[in-house]
Amino acid sequence: MFEELAKEDKLIYDLIIAEKERQMDGIELIPSENLVTKAVLEAMGSYPNNKYSEGYPGKRYYGGNEVIDKIENEAINRCKTLFGAEHVNVQPNSGSPANMAAYAALLSPGDKALGMKLTEGGHLTHGHKVNFSGKTYNFLQYGVDKETETLDYDAIAEIASKEKPKLILSGYTAYPRKIDFKKFRSICDEVGAYCMADIAHIAGLCAAGVHENPVSYFDVVTTTTHKTLRGPRSAIIMCKEEIAEKIDKAVFPGLQGGPHEHTIAAKAVAFKEANTPEFKNYAEQIVKNAKALGEALADLGYRLVSGGTDNHLLLVDTRVGGISGIDAEKALEKGGMYCNKNTIPFETGSPWDPSGIRIGTPVLTTRGMKEKEMNEVASFMDQALKAKDDDAKLAEIKVNVTKFCKQFPFYD
Ligand SMILES: *Cc1c(COP(=O)(O)O)cnc(C)c1O
């Protein structure tokens, strides 16, 4: 791969290869990341990139879309099969614009909606005041229960019945537990709200049946395609037939112009890959690994938000070890491990200086690691966190981390 690029633009080629090596040589713990297959990468860097195809299959604003229509229809049909969706829009360019389109389809500016607070696991696009969502709509926010650090459905139902939001949103960016989507559906039914889920993080688990899949009984479900679903950096919207036209109009012409058909081709490839027994095993292993990593960290004395995990991610309260989230992220990075600082429920710091880190197992599982290796990963993390002020020690840890990673090659 990349022979032409190496000849024409050595600097960018070298940087791309350096980034690949960084990915291969380190322990990637960021739960929103993954490694796609070469087949997905090839589809992404391919000829449909050159085509304008505003509109939808069969009704385009440009000629020459006969082949593109086949690609987009194939992506749509594969996605319908994978998630059991009535209608799918495969054009959103990423998770945030997918949410923007879903809101634009169902709400008017100023309408009330209800989503999870950013600091307790929601996404910026779920109503944060610095984001278009919080600026455009009247987003009310729910959080987690103080004792259990898990969703308190009675509290959510109470806000819903008092405030009567037009849309209620579930699905999170930093929530380690199962979501009871049926409860959300019944809360929405009681108050007559649209029932929306943003399954960006857990889409791969939902597709594999490892987490409850809300698609068949929710009004609208958005998701990125590049997290546990292990596809290209992009997104999709799945919805009921009744609102299909509104959703499609909101995406195009409402929000986007020409769809990225090369990425849509790559999404089709990823949907095919996800609809296999191997992917189901993969998704199961992600969860087993996350549980194993959580247990190993707990044994080393770390506090996990909510006490553990049911999915692919863990929130570690680093205050218990006397480290801020920011210092933990930095120490791990110097040791060749990548995570992100993250707020924890009832945060006393700020998103820039929070009290925890968010870690997860999708990438490590893609590389073939199992429960046994999670003990080693926890031990590397512990060593680095304890050596946070000792750069020489952290450099030594990084060398060992790289040796460990070399046992699990992915891209050659
Ligand atoms: C990642 C994520 C998004 C945003 O996706 P981008 O592709 O980064 O715009 C939206 N919602 C949730 C819940 C996410 O985790």
Image (tube, rainbow, N blue to C red):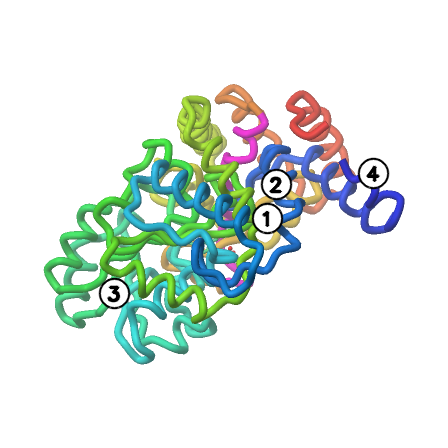
In terms of sequence position, does the residue under pointer 1 or pointer 3 come before the other? 3
Count all numbered tags in the image, as a single digit: 4
- The residue carrying mark 2 is 43
- C-beta proximity under 8 Å, tags 1 and 4: no
- The residue carrying mark 1 is 262
Residue lying furthest bottom in this view?
A: 110
Is residue 169 found left or right of 26 in the rendered image? Answer: left
| Type of amino acid at the residue the image marks with label 4 | Glu
Residue lying furthest left in this view?
A: 190
Distance from Cα at disc 4 to Cα at disc 3: 50 Å
| Type of amino acid at the residue the image marks with label 1 | His
In terms of sequence position, does the residue under pointer 1 or pointer 4 come before the other? 4
- C-beta proximity under 8 Å, tags 2 and 1: yes
Categorize mark 1 by other alpha carbons within 10 Å: few (<14), some (14-19), many (20+).
Answer: many
Residue in the picture at 81% in, 50% down: 12
Categorize mark 2 by other alpha carbons within 10 Å: few (<14), some (14-19), many (20+).
Answer: many
Whether residue 324 is visible, yes or no, is no
Is residue 356 found left or right of 284 in the rendered image? Answer: right
Residue in the picture at 30% in, 58% down: 244
Of the two numbered discs 4 and 3 in the rendering, the one whose residue sits closer to the viewer: 4
Q: Nearer the viewer, residue 216 or 150?
A: 216
In terms of sequence position, does the residue under pointer 2 or pointer 1 come before the other? 2
Residue stretch rendered in magenta on the structure:
351-367
Percent x, y of residue 33: 55, 43
- The residue carrying mark 4 is 3
As for residue 261 lying within the magenta part, the answer is no
Distance from Cα at disc 1 to Cα at disc 3: 33 Å
Q: Which mark is residue 167?
A: 3
Residue in the picture at 29% in, 72% down: 107
- C-beta proximity under 8 Å, tags 2 and 4: no
